Amino acid sequence: MRRSVEATAETRKSIISTAAREFRKNGEKLGLADIMGAAGLTNGAFYRHFASKEELFAESVAHALDSLGDKMEQSIAAKPDSPLATVIGVYLSCAHRDNVSGGCPLAALGSEIARAPKKVRGTLMHSYKRVVGIVAACLSTGSEEERRATAEYILASMAGLLTMSRVVCDKDESSRILEDGVRRLIQSNI
């Protein structure tokens, strides 16, 4: 009996969600068997849903970026009086630092994304632009182009600070990197 279209779509979404988590946790070199096993499926099921691992990588990173955008929007909705401080504070938090598999794919996979083929990076652009747009909407001054450029600066700074907070071994030093980053980014952009 053939699976329903809905069941097939749900399986595909489950694979993408699992891959997004596993890639952030283990890197792009992760094997298909590992991803499919984490999704509770066999390797044979993979090619019913994706043409290549590259396609899955692109879609899973886009999914992770969309999840980041959703979290940013939820945080802003909870504290609408200070949207930029809220976004920066949530992004540069110890909880985000400690949740590599559920966190920002730019911090977890940035160098791997940069080395990916143009087609893969192109797949991510809509999601990337959405996240930049969310940050830009938190800014109150400047032209649209200036707000976009500042939002990209803020996003790059946050991803770098989060990465550095994960690199250092000492938790106190790691927390200081995050706290200083929050303070400096908020001071320089409000």
Image (cartoon, rainbow, N blue to C red):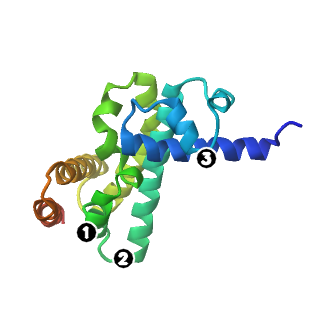
Foreground tag (3 vs 1): 3
The crowd level at tag 2 (other Cα within 10 Å; few <14, some 14-19, many 20+) is: some
Element class at badge 1: helix
User: Disc 2 versus disc 1: distance between alpha carbons?
Assistant: 9 Å
Residue nearer the viewer, 144 or 20:
20
The crowd level at tag 1 (other Cα within 10 Å; few <14, some 14-19, many 20+) is: many
Q: Earlier in the sequence, mark 3 or mark 1?
A: 3
Direction right: furthest residue: 1
Report which residue position mark 3 lands on: 14
Position of 138 compared to 141: left or right? right
Residue nearer the viewer, 97 or 143:
97
On residue 79, which mark appears?
Answer: 2
Q: Are marks 2 and 1 in contact (CB under 8 Å)?
A: yes
Q: Earlier in the sequence, mark 2 or mark 3?
A: 3
User: Disc 3 versus disc 1: distance between alpha carbons?
Assistant: 33 Å
Report which residue position mark 1 lands on: 85
Residue at 25% of width from left, 46% of height from top? 149
Residue nearer the viewer, 37 or 174:
37
Q: Earlier in the sequence, mark 2 or mark 1?
A: 2
Foreground tag (2 vs 3): 3
